[in-house]
Amino acid sequence: MKIGFPVKPEGRGGTRTWVKAFSNYCISKGHQVYFSKNEKVDIFITLAFYTTPDELKRMKQRNTKILYRMDGIYYNFLTDNRTTVRLNRLIADSMKLADRIIYQSDFSKVMASQLFNGQELPGIVIYNGADSNVFKEEGKTLPKPDDKKIILSIAYWGPELMAEYSIRNIINIAKEFSDRKDIEFWVLGEAYPHVEDILKKANLSNITRYNLRTPITRERMPEYIRTSDIILHTRPNDACSNLIIEAMNVGKPIVGLNLGSTPELLGDAGLRGECEPSFEHFPVINIKSMASQILKTFDNYEYYKEKIKERSKRFTLEQMCEKYFIEINKLVNN
C-alpha cells in the first residue's frame, strides 16, 4: 500500500512526532511511505492545516482516500483573529473533504464541533501511543541529588502565548513549595527566548534546572522522565498529550489539569488540579489545588506509580497503529 503524509517527520511538535512514529510503523509492515502531496498514493493522511482544499480535491480525483487526524483548533487568545479564522477554515475544510476522521480524544471531538456550530462530524477516537521499547521504566537516568524530589515540566512549549501561560503557572506552583528544601523543579524544552527570561526574572531557588532554548530530542526524553519523580503538565486544552502518554509508559506519576483530554488519559491513575475551563481565554488554574495534588501524589507515591503503569497498557504505539490500520484498510478496500 502507498501511504502519503503532508509533512516530513523531522522537526518539533507533536504532529511531526506522530508522523515519524506512524510512518516508521508503516514502513516496518512493508508499506511504501511518501512525504509529498503530489505522489499518487492509496491513502493520504493529513493533519492540522497542512493541506489545502484544492490539494485534497486533486487527490480525490486520483482516487486517493483521505484520512484526517484531528488534533485541535485555534483560538483568538493564542493568535490574532485573522490567523485564527484562516487556520480554522483550513481545518474545517479538510475535515469536510476527508473520507474518515480520526479524533485523538473525546475532547478533540468537542473542540472540532466548534467549527460546525456545535455539531460533531462522524469519526472515531484513537488515542496516541508511546513506543514502549523507548519509553520504559528501565534505562539510563541523569544525575540528581539523592535527597531531592524532582518535579519535571518538559515540552516543546508551542505558540508564544501558550508557552508564557504554561511557564507562569509553573512558577506560581513552584512558589507554593518555597519552604520545601526536598523538592526541586526542572523546566526544559524549547520555547521562545524571552520565555526563559520569565524564569530567570522569577529567580526561584527551587527551580534548579531550566533551559528553554534547547529542544530535548526524542531519544533523550525517556532519560529525563525516568530521572524525575513527578511529571507536571500545565498545558490546557491538549487534544492528547504525548508527554502524559510517554510518562505513563515510563511509569512516572503525573499531575495535570482537570481539563482538555487529561481527565480521559489519566482516569483515576493521576491527580488533577482544579481550573476554570474556557475556550474564550486561557483557563484559570487553581494554583493551591495543583500544589495540593502534587503533595497527595508524593504521600501516596507507590500507589500512583502502580496505577499509572497499569494505565499505560492502554496507550502503546503498537495498539495505536493497529487501530489506524483497521480504519485505513476499511477505506482502501471499499
Image: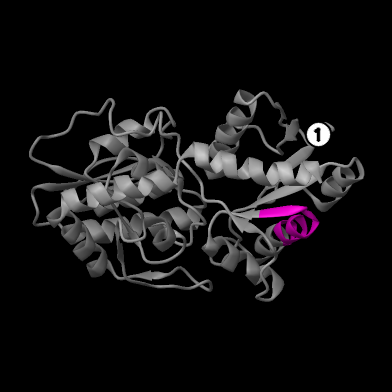
For residue 244, above or below residue 76: above
Asked which secondary structure carries label 1, the reply is: loop
Residue 186, how many percent across, how many down?
26, 43
Residue drawn at x 22%, y 68% is 288
Location of the N terminus by quadrant is: top right
Q: Is residue 206 left or right of residue 159?
A: left
Circle count: 1
Residue 99 falls inside the magenta stretch: yes
What type of secondary structure mainly makes up the magenta span?
Answer: helix
For residue 134, above or below residue 66: above
Furthest-right residue in this view: 61
Residue 314, how many percent across, how many down?
43, 48
User: Can see residue 227?
Assistant: yes
Q: Quadrant of residue 110?
A: bottom right
Of 187 and 5, which appears nearest the observer?
A: 5
Q: Which residue is denoted by mark 1 in the rendering?
A: 41
Disc 1 marks a residue whose amino acid type is: Val
Residue 8, how many percent across, how many down?
65, 32
Residue drawn at x 64%, y 71% is 114
Residue drawn at x 71%, y 31% is 35
Residue extent of the magenta highlight: 89-101
Residue drawn at x 34%, y 52% is 198
